[in-house]
Amino acid sequence: MNRATHPTSEPPPAAHDDRREAVYDQWLVLRSQGGDAEAFAQLVRRWSPRLLRHARRLLDTDADARDAAQDAWLSITGALNRLNDPATFRRWAYRIVTRRCADHLRRAQRQRRTDTAAAVPEAAPIPDEHHDEIDRLRAAIRALPAERRVVLSLLYVDGLTTTEIASVLEIPTGTVKSRLRLARDELRRTLDPHSDSTAKE
């Protein structure tokens, strides 16, 4: 296995593009698997904001997202040494967050069935007085169904490919593409009600 070859203790050159960032993450994973506490701390610092952002897309409140992300890090910490290919860390970590969020949603649904007063809206309402284009776009994205909002953000914010998104969400690639198309169509209708939403992209 590749881990048999001990990674150098010196980090790769400073990362300025996506490829070097990926190489640096792989180096951190290898060092962490070898017991380097500082490398693991750096991995956590680099990835905590991204994984928390992903959890926020899937859950209703910041508090719930933080809880799910923390649970995910416990799982990541416990399973990191079993990750055979450091290059897959990104989608592996996102997938763990997705599963912890799903666990949280199931618990919340059970709670809502027994206590309707604790129910939380599925999506934030679109503010009535937002006239700025950026604010309108953000509001429109927030109003998307969660499954469409997630694939849109993973593609455009996190830079994952449709194949990687399918792996993270554990759904077929065709489903990812379908959700992206529906999300774009819905945004177009919201931002420009007079547009032809059936036009081909």
Image (spheres, rainbow, N blue to C red):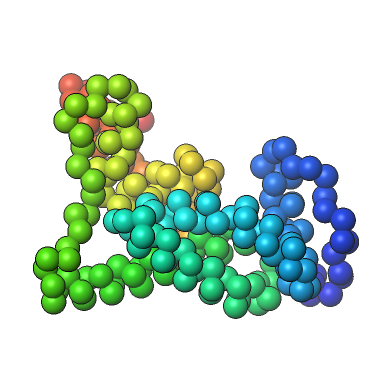
| 164 left or right, relative to 17 | left
Residue 158 against residue 199 in the figure, above or below: below
Q: How far across and down, in percent of the image, does residue 17 sit?
A: 70, 38
Residue shown at 41% from the left, 57% from the top: 55
In the displayed orientation, state which residue is furthest to the left.
116
Q: Where on the picture, by quarter, is residue 112?
A: bottom left
Q: How far across and down, in percent of the image, does residue 7 sit?
A: 85, 64
Q: Where on the picture, by quarter, is residue 44?
A: bottom right
Residue shown at 12% from the left, 66% from the top: 117
Residue 67 against residue 194 in the figure, above or below: below
| 76 left or right, relative to 148 | right
Classify the position of the N terminus by image quarter: bottom right
| 1 left or right, relative to 192 | right
Is residue 76 or residue 44 the one in the foreground?
44
Residue shown at 60% from the left, 76% from the top: 79
Query: Does residue 58 appear anywhere in the picture?
Result: no
| 66 left or right, relative to 10 | left
Classify the position of the C terminus by image quarter: top left
Q: Where on the picture, by quarter, is residue 5?
A: bottom right
- The number of numbered discs placed on residues in the rendered structure image is 0
Residue 129 against residue 51 in the figure, above or below: above
Residue shown at 48% from the left, 67% from the top: 70
Q: How far across and down, in percent of the image, does residue 151 sit?
A: 40, 49
Is residue 135 or residue 23 the one in the foreground?
135
Q: How far across and down, in percent of the image, does residue 74 sit?
A: 54, 73
Query: Does residue 40 appear anywhere in the picture?
Result: yes
